[in-house]
Image: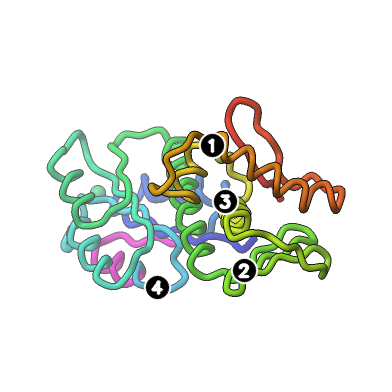
Amino acid sequence: MDKKKILIVEDEQKIARFLELELKYEGYEVDIANNGRDGLEKGKGEDVDLIVLDLMLPGLSGIEVCRRLRQTSDVPIIMLTAKDDISDKVTGLDIGADDYMTKPFAVEELLARIRVLLKRMQNGRDKSNLQILERGLLKLSKNNYKVEYDGENIDLTKKEFELLEFMMVNKNIVLTREKILDKVWGYDYFGDTNIIDVYIRYLRSKIDQKYNINLIETVRGVGYIIRD
Ligand code: CA
């Protein structure tokens, strides 16, 4: 895992320093900008994975920094707003910030939100970029609907393939039957979620049982998961 880089845009040195220490302790690389202009410059950097952006900044405001960044970048942005300024929050979210925290805040909550946004970003990238998904000896190629185990071709129907693909894209996330139904079958299907269990059985007989592996796990009462 490469280190994720987080940019803190905050003019209050004490807060910036505090966040820097906390984030570094969590294993992130950290850069700090003490004003809006500097934040905008650094925020455009290709290597920045997420920005913690204070709205109350001297010179260029946080809102303006966010607005300008969004013209060219989809980097996740968490705004820090003073007090309970509702209008700042609404404006910030309207112009493309992903989340906000009201000062003072518990650093654990900020860390949790950072993790969520980084994960969402990563999932999005994987979905759009990765043509080949792998898990152990199992290999799935999106562009030609091909699935192999240790080089051996596995014959799947289109739906089986789509179900497996969805589960591989969302590896390590528990997927409910409803979510699978919604994402894989979509709105053209009017039956109940039992169909998921049926297709999971098909996949298990073609992969898990055939190769004697534990690919698809049942999460009792919730759904299914493929773990790394
Ligand atoms: Ca400030």
Can you tell which of label 1 and label 2 is closer to the viewer? 2
Answer left or right for 34 relative to 118. Answer: left
Per the image, the residue denoted by label 4 is: 45
Label 1 to label 3: alpha-carbon separation: 12 Å
Give the residue pinned by disc 3.
170
Residue 70 placement: quadrant = bottom left
Residue 139, x across and y down, in percent? 72, 65
Q: Is residue 131 left or right of residue 107?
A: right
- CA gap, disc 4 to disc 1? 38 Å
Q: CA distance from mark 1 to mark 2?
A: 24 Å
Q: Find the residue positioned furthest to the right.
A: 212
Instruction: Indicate the amino acid at tag 3.
Output: Asn
* Label number found at residue 145: 2
Classify mark 3: helix, strand or loop. loop
Kindly identify which numbered label has been placed on residue 40: none
Q: Amino acid at mark 1?
A: Thr
Q: Kindly tell me whether residue 18 is visible in this rendering.
A: no
Of the 4 image quadrants, the one containing the N terminus is bottom right
Circle 2 — which element?
Answer: loop
* Horizontal and vertical percent position of residue 61: 18, 58
Residue at the image position 23 percent from the left and 49 percent from the top: 93
Characterize the local packing of mark 1: few (<14), some (14-19) or many (20 or more) Cα atoms within 10 angstroms.
Answer: some
Residue 123 colored in magenta in the image: no
Residue sitting at x 59%, y 34%: 223
Label 3 – label 2 distance at C-alpha: 18 Å
Q: Which residue is mark 1?
A: 176
